Image: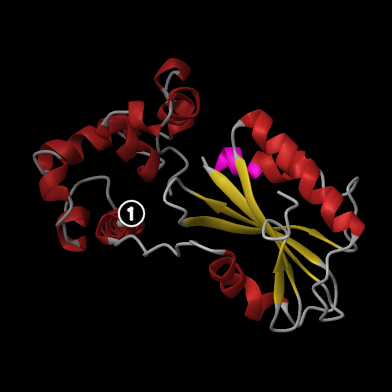
Amino acid sequence: MSPTSIMIRDVPKEDRPRERLVKYGAHNLSNQELLAILLGSGSKKESVTSLAQHILIHFEGIMLLKDATIEELTAIKGIGAAKAVLLLSAIEFGKRLQQMKPVEKYVIRSPEDGADFVMEEMRDLKQEHFVCLFLNTKNQVLHRQTVFIGSLNASIVHPREVFKEAVKRSAASIICAHNHPSGDPSPSQEDIQVTQRLSECGKMIGIELLDHLVIGDRKFISLKEKGYL
């Protein structure tokens, strides 16, 4: 890039698209501003925002730009191979995102469904792993996260860590699971205390703890079925 190229940082601050994106969000930027961010710099005679406008005029907007070739882009004054490759990569990335089909989410209708979802990953672990499944209103798994590794203790498995992620994921409910490396899923007093504490916190913020599963070697115990929820 030429040292005399006009870059985004040379544009008056109030007009800088990067700063506007940070302040207002990408959805509030124009096509020209988004294109200027991708380009990064203009040419000796043209600012980056002017170059972005020039491209949009050349392709009559973004509809034709999405099918542009590298030859068409590099034919525009101020667009070299590097800028053309960057634009084509961004366009292709956008196309792939648009074409993505949602993955069918796993539905948990029973304690057995929950145990099946985590059993193979958890039954052979040598340390206790405390895992949370975050569910939507249809009991579909939105996200699975290991919250804590180590011996279970009510003061260590803090509801803040569990429900912070639940709120972030807009979860309607959660299922917790942890393994017993011994293979025996019989719940300990600590398991029960953690369950009751999480249940109380969930009721206060409106995200229900549906169950707490203790995973053993190809067997499990549901603390809900045992009457602790």
- Residue 82, quarter of picture: bottom left
Is 168 contained in the magenta span? yes
Does any portion of residue 44 appear in the rendered image? no
Q: Is residue 109 above or below residue 166?
A: below
- Residue 131, quarter of picture: bottom right
Q: Is residue 62 left or right of residue 108?
A: left
Q: Secondary structure at mark 1?
A: helix
Which residue shows up at 91% across the image and 45% down it? 155
Q: Residues within 10 Å of mark 1 (few under 14, many from 20)?
A: some
Nearest the viewer among 35 and 104 is 104
Q: Magenta stretch: give its range.
A: 165-169
Q: Is residue 199 above or below residue 99?
A: above
Which color scheme does this rendered protein use? Answer: secondary structure
Q: Is residue 24 left or right of residue 42?
A: right
Mark 1, residue position: 90
Where residue 97 appears, as percent x and y from the top left, is: 32, 56
Which residue shows up at 26% across the image and 32% down it? 32
Where residue 184 appears, as percent x and y from the top left, is: 83, 78
Q: Is residue 165 above or below residue 150?
A: above
Where residue 152 appears, as percent x and y from the top left, is: 88, 58
- Most frequent secondary structure within the magenta stretch: helix
Where residue 117 appears, as percent x and y from the top left, is: 57, 71
Name, please, the residue furthest toward the top: 14
Is 127 contained in the magenta span? no
Which residue shows up at 39% across the image and 20% down it? 15
